[in-house]
Image: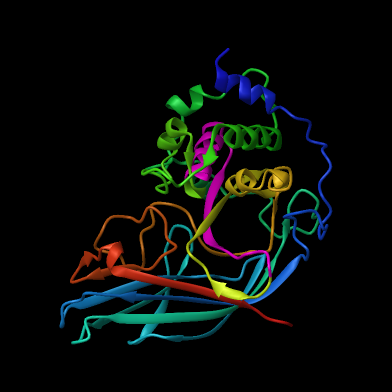
Amino acid sequence: MNRIATILLIGLLPLDFALPAGGAQKEGLPTTSIRHFRFHYGASIQHLNPGSRVQVWSPMPQTTSHQKIKLLGWDIPANARFTNEAKYGNQIIYFQTMANESREITFQISCQVERHEVRSLTDTDDQLAKTLTSQQQIKFLTANQRVPIGGKLLALIPLVDLPQDAMGRGHVLYNHVGDHMRYDKSKAGYGHGDALWACESRFGNCTDFHSLFISMSRSLDIPAKFVMGFPLPQTRGQGQISGYHCWAYFHVKNRGWIPVDISEADKHPQMRQYYFGNLTPDRIEFSTGRDIILTPRQSGPPLNYFVYPHVEVDGKPWPLEQISNRFSYEDIEI
């Protein structure tokens, strides 16, 4: 038996394991089930030629069963409008303007957030979909450009001795990806969410961990989806946020969407048990899905994922190195 198959079989743990109680004071576990904060999302688009046409698509977080969003306002140098992309329903703030002699365009969007801890294995009042429509099944079982199904990835999964239920299989895959991968951004190539690359490299960031998990889940006919957002430090206060965070969900019929955060479990091994089926409230969700086609339609190719602003100048994607993103938060008392 090869090493990967052995790892998977070791991952066949009983599903009646005890979950940490919400609010426990164990290291890393959430100390509260709800967090209130303001979130500021902005960017500076630089080195523009005066007179050039600039289009900006910015993701906008939406209220879900686990977060409430209140738009506080924006500072945008043009008339802006809300749109929704068609496939996943992600909300967008879109505007266009002309670059002036300053050769720079800046904008900021601020919102107030009430974010709840997710405890899908014990929460009996989960509002997430217990069943999926046929269209949703297709959407979350179909391959994406960098998230293939079958082939090499399917060959890595030992079909003998796998649990028959989706929850059990999801748990096996969670353990496998956690054993197979390590969180490491010291080498080039990470961050594209390429499942085959992640499988071979065995390291990466959150996009790589969860793309591999989603590929393997869909290969076993388990619907799975990719979610993008931002992390907050557990300590209350205020500060800058350096970049995005992502996690995944897999679907269990008559149970709903079950979250996994495998990269955080790798960084915090004491929370590995927790991050199967649970999410801390120290985050904000911005978008779902891969291969995103924006509204209005961008001139460039579909976006691999959508968490940073997409900018096009005179109909061409603007280089990411000429966009300076700024994200910050401050906790508030309610």
Q: Residue furthest front?
A: 186
Residue 332 placement: quadrant: bottom right
Q: Is residue 268 left or right of residue 84?
A: right
- For the question of whether residue 119 can be seen, the reply is yes
Q: Position of residue 138 (x, y in %)?
A: 49, 44
Q: Nearer the viewer, residue 106 or 289?
A: 106
Q: Nearer the viewer, residue 160 or 36?
A: 36
Residue 12 placement: quadrant: top right
Q: Nearer the viewer, residue 31 or 290?
A: 31
At horizontal 75% and vertical 56% (from top left) the residue drawn is 29
**Which part of the image, by quadrant, shows the C terminus?**
bottom right
Q: Nearer the viewer, residue 163 or 192?
A: 192
Indicate whether residue 220 is drawn in magenta. Answer: yes
Identify the magenta region: 208-235
Q: Is residue 64 above or below residue 192?
A: below
Indicate whether residue 170 is drawn in magenta. Answer: no
Q: Position of residue 279 (x, y in %)?
A: 68, 55
Q: Is residue 218 left or right of residue 277?
A: left
